[in-house]
Image (cartoon, rainbow, N blue to C red):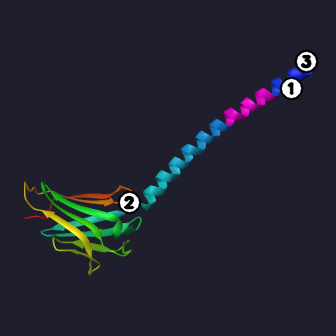
Amino acid sequence: MKRLDLYISLIAIMWLAVVVLGFISDQDVIQRSDAMQSSTLAMFQPDITAEVEKDLVKLSHTGGGDITLSNITIIIEQGDASAIYEKLNQSNDKFVIGDTLHLTPAGVSLNGRELKVGKISINSSGVVRNETTVTLVNLTSGNLLAKIVSDEEFFS
């Protein structure tokens, strides 16, 4: 009888050890996958630069992941004045490393080729400051792809 109690105690201890070790191991896996996901996201985060002139923003893709143009909204803000570009192109055109995207109040071009734009909303009223902010947002995920601030003016 004592031997049976000893076996039951040993089985209970082994079971407890397996559960505790499994729990600790699962936490390690979760922490590692979070770290891997963060480094993966950083690897694909696009690197975008902007040159701002009166009625023209030139965006250059200098590194990171490709951007499907139909999945982004681009917002140009200068104080209360703004320009919002939605649904750039109806196909699967991508903004990739080496590409330039030109935005004007009248339209958008990718490497010199005019794109169809679903909607351009221009609000040039209100307080206009010297500083211009250009923001790219991924519509699918809601993630901020780029936010660039320039001392140059888009609106006059």
Question: In the figure, residue 97 lies in which quadrant?
Answer: bottom left
Alpha-carbon neighbours of circle 1 within 10 Å: few (<14), some, or many (≥20)?
few
Quote the CA–CA distance across marks 1 and 3.
9 Å
Q: Point out residue 3 in the picture as x, y percentages from the top left corner.
A: 91, 21
Q: Nearer the viewer, residue 56 or 73?
A: 73
Question: In the figure, residue 70 lies in which quadrant?
Answer: bottom left
Q: Point out residue 141 in the picture as x, y percentages from the top left corner.
A: 39, 56
Task: Give the residue pinned by disc 2.
Answer: 140
Alpha-carbon neighbours of circle 2 within 10 Å: few (<14), some, or many (≥20)?
few
| Circle 1: residue type | Tyr
Task: Give the residue pinned by disc 1.
Answer: 7
Label 1 secondary element: helix
Q: Point out residue 46 in the picture as x, y percentages from the top left corner.
A: 37, 63
Whichever of labels 2 and 3 marks the residue nearer the N terminus, that label is 3
Whichever of labels 1 and 3 marks the residue nearer the N terminus, that label is 3
| Circle 3: residue type | Lys
Q: Based on the picture, tell me whether residue 82 belongs to the magenta stretch.
A: no
Q: Point out residue 137 in the picture as x, y percentages from the top left corner.
A: 31, 59
For the point 68% across and 35% down, which residue is it? 21
Mark number, residue 103: none
Task: Give the residue pinned by disc 3.
Answer: 2
Q: Which residues are magenta?
A: 11-21
